[in-house]
Amino acid sequence: MIEKVIFYILAFVIFIAIFAKLIKRNDTIYIYLLVMQFFGIAIRFINITNNLKLTWNIILLLYMVSVVIPLAIIILEKKKMHLSEFICVLKAKINFKHGNNDIARKKLVKLIAKYPNSYYAHRLLAQIFEKEGKDEESIDEYVKAVDLNTKDYDSYYQIIFLLNKNGKQNESEKMLIELINKKPEYYKASELLGSILYNQEKFKQAVKVYAEALKYNPTRHELYYNLAMTYTRLNDFQTAKIYYEKAVAINSMLYHARINIAQIALITGDLDEAKARFTNCIQDKDSEPDSYYYLAIISLLKGEKDRAVSYINMAIELDNRIYVKVQSQEIFSSIIDEVRPSEGKSHRYHLTYQELITKKHLDDTFNLIDKMKKNESIIKTENNDKEYIQDKQINFDQYKNY
């Protein structure tokens, strides 16, 4: 009996509240809601007056249409979202998800004409424009969404992201600093700011940004990885290695971080460690060609020419551009006649600009060190030859005196 009384009190109060919204908003959508609620209350009334037994499934359904759904709509509107707005945004989302962008856009434009301050409509419309590559329109809609909800940091970030994408780095940098000051734990903002500073070769500033972000996000592998790449550009390879390993410890699938560790081992002359790490990187298709390329170099440094030939031909088979690279590297001169060009496709690397530049820096550093070592060896040989000639000349002069 108590349950029935509670049902009627709740249903009646909510019915009056919905009816009041119909009068206030003059929105016919509420009529459908009232009709649904009325049928739920009427069926429950017939059930009670005629002492009919209903299953729990039917009773639950009556609660849903008479109490739960209407109450949810009242709560939704407390958050400044009208029922018709909610339904329209939901329809637009479904269309957008299934690729019907035109239908979704038209629905949202029509909704905004009726509710100009619809935060959800502006945000979804911004996402549609962004997906279509209409960056200016997208930024305008994101700005409107942020104006309506100042705590929508995701939309604010997207504005910055699109500005940076369109070459407005200075404006992006200022907005990112503002966002980080407001929400320091928002790691994506720190990641993007660090990337902008990295691209401007402001490496020490980038290090500070990433290090500060790690205080709030100590488990984000992206921050460790970016910090490691920045230290790589500073030629602080030992510190870079520490952060690469921290990134890999969190995300074992970071093969580009793994291959960078291997390259650092090669640069520092630890051939055994480098070989082990490059061998491990062969497991990943994206880093496989480079792994074979560097395993060939290690084999040459160890005097294993046959193995070097095998590795370098594997690398070229995976990425035919490596053949051109091999021809320009002096280290391969002893086996160049056994290296075969390939008619295979060029390998497509899934690397960010930051990763590509870091990779090139490590390549250049190794080539420079290798060249310096060869020059030192030539100079040392020349000095030894001079000492030998001078020594012979002294002995000859002494012989002439007898």
Image (cartoon, helix red, strand yellow):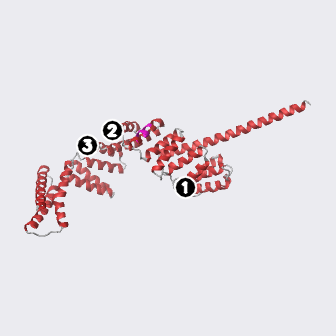
Q: Which residue is mark 2?
A: 182
Nearer to the camera, 79 or 59: 59
Report how far apart the C-alphas of labels 3 and 2 lie in the structure.
17 Å
* Badge 1 element: loop
Residue 234's disc number: none
Q: Earlier in the sequence, mark 3 or mark 2?
A: 3
Q: Position of residue 69 (x, y in %)?
A: 19, 57
Q: Residue at x 62, y 52 (%)?
A: 296
Please give the residue where the numbered disc 3 appears in the rendered image: 148
Task: Please state the horizontal and vertical placement of residue 35, each as a whole percent of the image.
Answer: 13, 60
Residue located at (85% from left, 34% from top): 395
Helix, strand or loop under label 2: helix
The residue labelled by disc 1 is 282
Few, some or many C-alpha atoms within 10 Å of disc 3 (few <14, some 14-19, many ≥20)?
Answer: some
Residue nearer the viewer, 166 or 206: 206
The answer to whether residue 271 is left or right of residue 112 is: right
Q: Earlier in the sequence, mark 3 or mark 1?
A: 3
Q: Residue furthest left?
A: 49
Are the residues flagged by discs 3 and 1 in contact, CB closer than 8 Å? Answer: no
Residue 357 can be seen in this image:
no
Read off the magenta span.
208-213
Tell which circle, 2 or 1, labels the residue nearer the N-terminal end. Answer: 2
Query: Overall secondary structure of the magenta stretch?
Result: helix
Q: Are marks 3 and 2 in contact (CB under 8 Å)?
A: no
